[in-house]
Image (cartoon, rainbow, N blue to C red):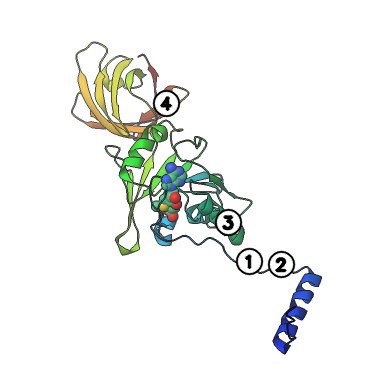
Amino acid sequence: MHSRTLTPRLFATSILSLLLAGCGAPTPVVEAYQPTIAQEGKDVVWVPTPTDLAERLLKAAKVRSNDLVYDLGAGDGKIAILAAQKFKATAVGVEFNPDMAEYARKNVQRAGVSDKVTIITGDIFKEDFSKASVVTLYLLPALNLKLRPTLLAMKPGTRVVSNTFTMGLWMADQTIQGDNGNIGYLWIVPANVEGQWSITGLPELGSSPVQLTIRQQFQELNGTLLSNDGQSSQAISGRLNGSSLSFDYRDQTGMLRTVEATLTNGELKGFLKGQPSSPLTAQKTS
Ligand SMILES: C[S@@+](CC[C@H](N)C(=O)[O-])C[C@H]1O[C@@H](n2cnc3c(N)ncnc32)[C@H](O)[C@@H]1O
């Protein structure tokens, strides 16, 4: 049998091990998994959003402590962690790669935000993120388009931010510059106001109500205001910011007017800009 000589070094190591065991000290953690930039992911590779852009995107989305932020394709968890650490939000990261998700969970622990951040191992096309008030993306154009119907069905006012990639014909409400030429986008999910409305409170267009037709493409609005006697038809043009809309038209004297209104419980309530004491309301007719 081969016996080991007790060298001073072996002796010191043995004593240290005994002491550590006796003190209940944790065994030093060897990080088993180290991701590499551009490693394969299910639908897109992993590349982390630069911190400066991540911060500006969350700032543009006006993330606050009452927000629930979902990062779809969470990678190492940096966006969810930042949302909790810097913006005090609750955050969920959805990551398909289980090793990456575990790595992100450890980062969450290290960052001390386990009470605010959850990392789910899952597929962004299967997980339910409908309760999010802010959605963050760094995917690909085709993946943004695939998510677009789900995003547009979210609560009006939900903010969506994306690193680099756009949403096809759904134009961004804001463009965000990062350092080093990085670019990001913000969209605010618009309410659906398309259709015919009966609007009261526009006296200069003749007797009430006036028929308002709204055509909507994402947050862009156009249509017509038709007077009750059918004598006057004015084009409208405007946009939505979540549930709030604003549109311009010219009255019969050619003067430019602006309607500002908010959709509440299926009804539009607002006023003519500059005349807050003259309320207007509109009900949907079809
Ligand atoms: C470009 S990285 C972005 C990481 C992080 N959001 C950021 O901005 O730093 C995309 C991440 O999405 C993950 N991913 C790819 N397809 C996915 C899917 N279908 N469901 C969930 N995660 C996915 C990848 O593994 C990768 O970590």
Q: Is mark 1 within 8 Å of ligand 1?
A: no
- The amino acid beneath tag 1 is Val
Q: Which residue is mark 2?
A: 26
- Separation of disc 2 and disc 1 at Cα? 8 Å
Q: Which mark is residue 29?
A: 1
Residue 196 in the image: x percent, y percent?
A: 32, 17
1 vs 4, front mark: 1
Callout 3–callout 2 Cβ contact below 8 Å: no
- Separation of disc 1 and disc 4 at Cα? 60 Å
Say whether disc 3 or disc 4 marks the residue closer to the N-terminus. 3
Instruction: Locate residue 132 relative to residue 203 in the image: left or right.
Output: right
Question: The residue tagged with tag 4: helix, strand or loop?
Answer: strand
Residue 148 in the image: x percent, y percent?
A: 36, 36
- The amino acid beneath tag 3 is Val
Q: Is mark 2 within 8 Å of ligand 1?
A: no
Q: Residues within 10 Å of mark 2 (few under 14, many from 20)?
A: few
Question: The residue tagged with tag 2: helix, strand or loop?
Answer: loop
- The amino acid beneath tag 2 is Pro
- Separation of disc 4 and disc 2 at Cα? 62 Å
> Which residue, as the protein is rendered here, is positioned at the far bottom?
8
What residue do we see at 35% from left, 41% from top? Answer: 144
